[in-house]
Amino acid sequence: MSDDHPTGSEPDETALARIETEVAMLMRLGEATRRATGTAEHRVLDRAAYVILRHLAAAGPQNVSALAARLDLDGSTVTRQVSAMQRDGLIDRAPDPTDGRGTVISPTPAGLHRMAAVRAARTRLYGDILADWSPGDRDTLAEMLTRLNRALENRPRR
Amino acid sequence: MSDDHPTGSEPDETALARIETEVAMLMRLGEATRRATGTAEHRVLDRAAYVILRHLAAAGPQNVSALAARLDLDGSTVTRQVSAMQRDGLIDRAPDPTDGRGTVISPTPAGLHRMAAVRAARTRLYGDILADWSPGDRDTLAEMLTRLNRALENRPRR
DNA sequence: TAATTCGGTTGTATCATACAAACATGAGCG
DNA sequence: CGCTCATGTTTGTATGATACAACCGAATTA
């Protein structure tokens, strides 16, 4: 690659282009990795189901809209996700006592357990994948990913 | 792995767990970001269509199987993707002269043009999102993402 | 109280993807 | 050579993830 631009050397533009490239690739490979994390017995948690559980565990029970906003998903998508998760016993829905319209979603013990299992499996997988990385490099990667996500979360919305 | 565990503070395990968390989140946010890159006129390139074009541009024309292996996709998925891309004039298919079974996929000028446009738009978007990052941090992020992807590509396959 | 907004659900559509089966072609072997 | 097996590709079918629009009921507000 590295099509030389006529504007002289621009290391910054190059970094952005590389970030763009690698994020796109990570989307693909990460998807494949996710699929690879499933074992026969316990169905793989959906992309969204997993992050929903993670978020409920981290930030406490909350309603559909809050989840949708946080995960940048449409409300209808979250509704369907939590419906499926309720069917599977991963979350509970209860009417919001303070607002007759809302329903509060909370993880069930089974949901938390499943989430932890998936998380452990994936963490193990990353341990294998990054087996030959130094602790310092792992820390740097974790740090950079965290900062990237925070930046993405704060991006100006449509 | 090294003899991790109860050696007091274990920054390494924490780093892996954080990486796992942030990759999962990046999958979600990156998806949203991708959708946000589309303008009304030109349809957003699919997740796969974009990486297929990128790969064809970088590694030259190749057949369905090679693309599938490289992108960790099922062959049937690639077939359908390239069918759609052919319909849209983004790629050409020609019988492989050296192997009657194969078809060689190559990007069309229109496909390359579209790819470049999407790439530019996304790079610009990342420029906005990372506006307040130092060039050094951007380089570090790019570097870490690249290394992560290389590690994912080399992961032991099923 | 009527109008409006807000939270949630359902209807419908699209895309992304996989697995299995079918099919054609190439390769190796008796 | 002709059979068998592997390989490249496609098609059939299923599932999942997701959005947008339309809708309903409750809350808020003018």
Image (cartoon, coloured by chain):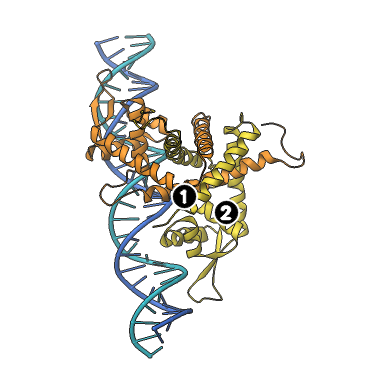
Chain colours: A yellow, B orange, C cyan, D blue
Callout 1: SS: helix
- Is residue B65 at least partly visible in the picture? no
Q: Where is residue A49 shown, x and y percent of the image?
A: 51, 53
Do marks 1 and 2 share a chain?
Answer: no
Figure check: B150 above or below D15: above
Q: Residue at x 48, y 55 (%)?
A: A71
Q: Give A110 or B7, whichever is nearer the viewer.
A: B7
* Left or right: B113, with D15 as reference point: left
Q: Which residue is drawn at 39% across and 47% down?
A: B34
Figure check: A114 above or below B110: below
Q: What residue type is labelled 1?
A: Leu
Q: Indicate the chain on which mark 2 is placed.
A: A
CA distance for labels 1 and 2: 15 Å
Residue carrying label 1 = B29
- Is residue B93 at least partly visible in the picture? yes
Q: Which amino acid does label 2 sit on?
A: Arg
Q: Indicate the chain on which mark 1 is placed.
A: B
Which is in the foreground here, disc 1 or disc 2? 1
Q: Where is residue C11 shown, x and y percent of the image?
A: 32, 64
The disc placed on residue B97 is none
